Amino acid sequence: MRFGAQAGGVEMRTVFDAEHEDIRTTVRKLLQRDADPDDLVVDAATNGFLGIGVPEEYGGGGSPDPRFLVTVAEEFVRAGHLGHAVRVVAHAGVAAPLIAEHATAETRAQWLPGLATGVTRVGIGRTALRVTASGDELILYGHAHSVVDGPEAGLLVLRVSDPAADDAVVLVDTTSPGIARTDVATPLALGGANLADLIFDEVRVPAKSRLPHAAVADFDKDDRLWLAVLAVAGTRAALDTTIAYVKERKVFGTPVASFENTRIVLGEALAQCEAAETLIDAVIAERVSSTLTTERSAVAKLQAIELFSRISDQGMQLHGGYGYMREYPISQLYADARYFRLGIDGSTALATELADRIAT
């Protein structure tokens, strides 16, 4: 939704149609009804949200349209569950489409039915594992930090950067010997993302577990896209909770929202948020039409994360001392934004891509 000239001062984002908004309404009602955050991902699975893009032959919804999942993710963030939204998009927006597109028929049949229903959870992460080939096996050594859904994952989808070899996407069955997991029990940020650190000590997986090289670009493209979607949703949440607070908070009997500085700061923040939503909607449309590039998704990711960090910081400042108290949502959004900044790994790649484009 955007502020505009339509009835009620709000206009619909044109990237979505009525079907997508129906899903949004369903998710919003679900989140209003479910008071237990621990059940949110289970509920998402029960309602078919984890399998939206899985082909019907494997028990999924069969829709490659990412806009359905965007509405799910945005409503999770709006309700204060950004960490759970990370899990949902990692599963349904990155891992499942990657396997459906690039895995062998045998591998698709092995994993996609479980992913469609949520019976199998998938953890995704970026890591600098060392991968060596031995006959028809790959052998993995090293660490993977803060893997989303790492504690419960039956399958890992790892974007591997190996200095001694080409980058790769590797599927790892977590029942493979040699994997040790340590839960990230009380993270400062991203509560609900179910993070774990993993150690790989001579973990052997079939050679077919390495997806074709084209999967690397698709992983990067979708991973960046979904981080951008969540960061913009987080920006909107930070702005909305700040506006609500300054309208209620009074200083010497005067609402903070009436102060000139507050109005200027929030007016600029609103303009920046609207611009970011326009960018992200354009990028989503490009993903729908299969024209999205890794460069373009990197631009969206960097812009969105920087804005999320800036607006959440401004929101915390406008909360005054209350902004540093855990019971106020802005404090969690501020921490989440700082965590997202750890994911600005695309800056170097983006600089290289832009330099190559300029040079040619």
Image (spheres, rainbow, N blue to C red):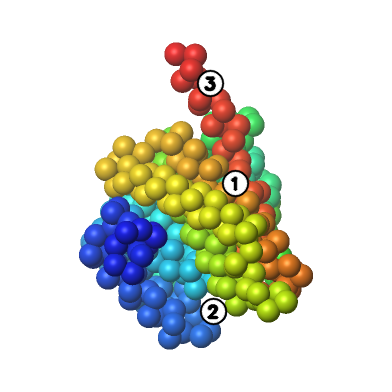
The Cα atoms of the two marked residues, 1 and 3, are separated by 21 Å
Q: Position of residue 254 (x, y in %)?
A: 65, 75
Name the residue located 48 percent from the left edge and 17 percent from the top edge: 358
Callout 3 amino acid: Ala
The Cα atoms of the two marked residues, 1 and 2, are separated by 27 Å
Nearest to viewer (mark 3 / mark 2):
3
Q: Position of residue 356 (x, y in %)?
A: 50, 19
Callout 2 amino acid: Pro
At numbered mark 3, what does the secondary structure look like: helix, strand or loop? helix
- Residue identifier under label 3: 355
Using a 10 Å C-alpha cutoff, classify the residue at mark 3 as few (fewer than 14 neighbours), some (14 to 19) or many (20 or more). few
Q: How many marks?
A: 3
Name the residue located 44 percent from the left edge and 13 percent from the top edge: 360
Callout 1 amino acid: Glu
Residue 37's tag is 2
- Residue identifier under label 1: 306
* Horizontal arrangement in the rendering, residue 83 relative to residue 72 (left or right): right
Name the residue located 61 percent from the left edge and 70 percent from the top edge: 246
Farthest top residue in view:
360
Observer able to see residue 178: no
* Horizontal arrangement in the rendering, residue 12 relative to residue 215 (left or right): left
